[in-house]
Every structure is written in C-alpha cells, then in structure tokens.
Amino acid sequence: MKKSSKSLTLAALLLSWQAFAGSQAYAQSGTDFYKSKRIFVVCSSAPGGGYDQYARLFARHIGKHIPGEPTVVVQNMPGAEGIKAANYIYNVAPQDGTFIGALPRSIGLSKIYSVHEQSLKFDPLKFKWIGSLKRDIGVLVVNTKSGINKPDDLKTHEVTVSSQAINSPNSIYARMLNQLYGSKIKPVEGYEGSTAGMLAVERFETDGHITGGTPTPVKNRILDWAKESKAKVVLQFGMHRDPDFPDAPTALELISDPKGHQLFQIAFTEQEVGSPFVFGPNVPKEQYEILLKAFKETYTDPEFIADAEREKAAIYALNASDIITLFEEAYASPPAVLEELRHLAGH
C-alpha cells in the first residue's frame, strides 16, 4: 500500500508539473506568437476604393500595437460584393490570427437579406468581430433645378434618382421611403457606380442621387455643389446626422410609425458598422484578445489620427462589443418584420 501510494503521489506531481509547464509555454506563445510573423488584411474591395483606404490605414498602424510587432500587409480580394472575401476568411484562411478580413458593411445583415442564398458560406454572428473605423451615412442629394428643398417635397413631387441596380442602397432606400413615408421617388437604374450616379445629378439627367455611404470624394463634391447652390442634401440615411449636413434630417427622424421606424433601424445597422474588421470563427481566444486590445490602441494613437487627417478619412471607431450588440438586436427582430424588410429590399 505504501509503494502504491508513493507511486500515485509521484504521478500526481508529474501531471501537475506538466500542466504548469504547458500553461507557461502557452503564455509564452501568446506573448511571442506574432514575433517575426506576417498578418494579412484581406480587403473585399479593389485598390483605391473607400474600404481599401481604411484597410491600408489600419494596416499601417496596428502592427506596432501587437506584441512582436508583426508586418501587416493588405491583400485585395474583390468579388460578389464582399462575399468572396468573407467566405475566404470564414472557411479557407488559417484560423491562427494571421488573417483579418476587411469586409463591407453589407456582410453583417447578409443572412437577413439573403437567407436562402447558396453563395453565403458563413454565419455573420460567428465571425470574431474586431471593430470598425468608420460610420457610413448615406444622403439624398438633389439638383437645385429639381425644386426639391425639404423632405416634405418628396411627397408632392415625383423625384427621379440615379441608381445602380434594384438591390443597391440607391433603390432599396427609395422603396422604403415610398412605402413608409409616402414619398414619390423613382429610381432610374443602370448607372455604373456612384461616380456615374453623381454625374447624372450634375447633368440634371435625374433629380437626385441616394448614396449608400458618403466617402470623402463624394462628400467633397456635394459640399462644392452646395457652396455654388447647384445642389443640396435634403435627407440622410443612417442612425445619426452627418455633421457636414446638420440641417438635413435622417429617415429615422421622419418616420413616426413604430414598425416603419424599426425597419429603418434594422436597415441602418450596417451603416453604423461601416467598414468592419473580422477574424474567422475559430481563431484562438488569446490571439483574438490581442487584436481587440491592439485595435483600441490604434484608433487612439496620435500618429494614426494624424495619418487619417492627412487622408481626410473621418474616424468613428466602433468596438467589437458594440458591433455584436447591433447585429444581435437586428437578428432578434420579429420574423414578420424581417420578412417585410426583405420584401422592401427586393429579396
């Protein structure tokens, strides 16, 4: 009995030592994991676009806030409105914390709008959200020749707006306003992107244009038009007013009906999230927590802030917990409300 007891004691000590050694090695790997490594930021848009600008701004600064100061590079993977990059991060990329997705705002609500879409190989709620550096606010800008001066005019005048396609924000927001506010907006579809849509307003081919977001080049163009009294912003699409257009209300401010208000609130969730960064669903907790901390340190870094100002990239940072809350609330909405939103969105 004594010999057996002694053997058990030695075995227990050995197991304890192995557990301690393992935990120490794990802690060491957490501290040194990123040393001499390369992090890839997979951007869902082509070089030169708004998402690409924020992905590169993020990549230039976050590395110094990660233990080991890894090299951070951007890889562009455009395709299928961000679905290609999202599928890659979720299913293909190594789940070790070295691949970050810089995805479009539409990815978060994709399972609401495209619940039966076979190309979606991911669950938005299972991404490990890292954060976002900007908030998107769309606007309805009209040529002053249209005679539209305030939101109420949208109910008494038929207003044409340039649009890309039936399922683009230009047309979706128009249908929502017509149904929930009583406006008479007629999307003219087929324009290739916001540049062509804005040119249509300038040439007065259409009365106006609804933007999904308002990137710096588009905003500067609108502000220049406003100074010359060529155009004005009469309405905004987001949870908040853009400070550059303080007199134009948001669609949420116009809708008094609770159901209509809820529909716009859900739709604007993606506007609030802006341009999010994510990990795949199986990235280890330790690497995830390192990136969460590094993200917060990055957007408060004076060098990052100065760089963003030089690029005229407006920063409105949203942490992971805020993003998760927004999406969980959206997906928890009553099924009938989500079905109506899908219908209004043309899905």
Image: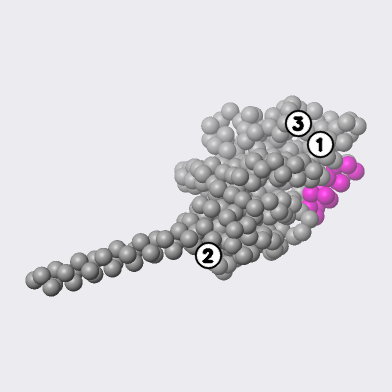
Q: Earlier in the sequence, mark 3 or mark 2?
A: 2
Are the residues tagged 1 and 3 within 8 Å (C-beta)?
Answer: no
Rendered position, 176 above or below 282:
above
Rendered position, 236 above or below 29:
above
Under mark 1, the amino acid is Val
Q: Nearer the viewer, residue 112 or 107?
A: 107
> How is the protein colored in the picture?
one colour
Rendered position, 177 above or below 15:
above
* Residue 34 screen position, x and y as percent: 57, 61
Under mark 2, the amino acid is Gln
Residue at which label 3 appears: 245
Cα gap from disc 1 to disc 3, whole angstroms: 13 Å
Side of 50 relative to 322 (left or right): right
Looking at the rendered image, the quarter that the N terminus falls into is bottom left
Q: Which residues are magenta?
A: 186-203
* Residue 99 screen position, x and y as percent: 60, 62
Q: Which mark is residue 95?
A: 2
Residue plotted at (59% across, 58% down): 68
Residue plotted at (53% across, 65% down): 95
Dot 3 lies on which element?
A: loop
Q: Earlier in the sequence, mark 1 or mark 3?
A: 1
* Residue 206 screen position, x and y as percent: 83, 43
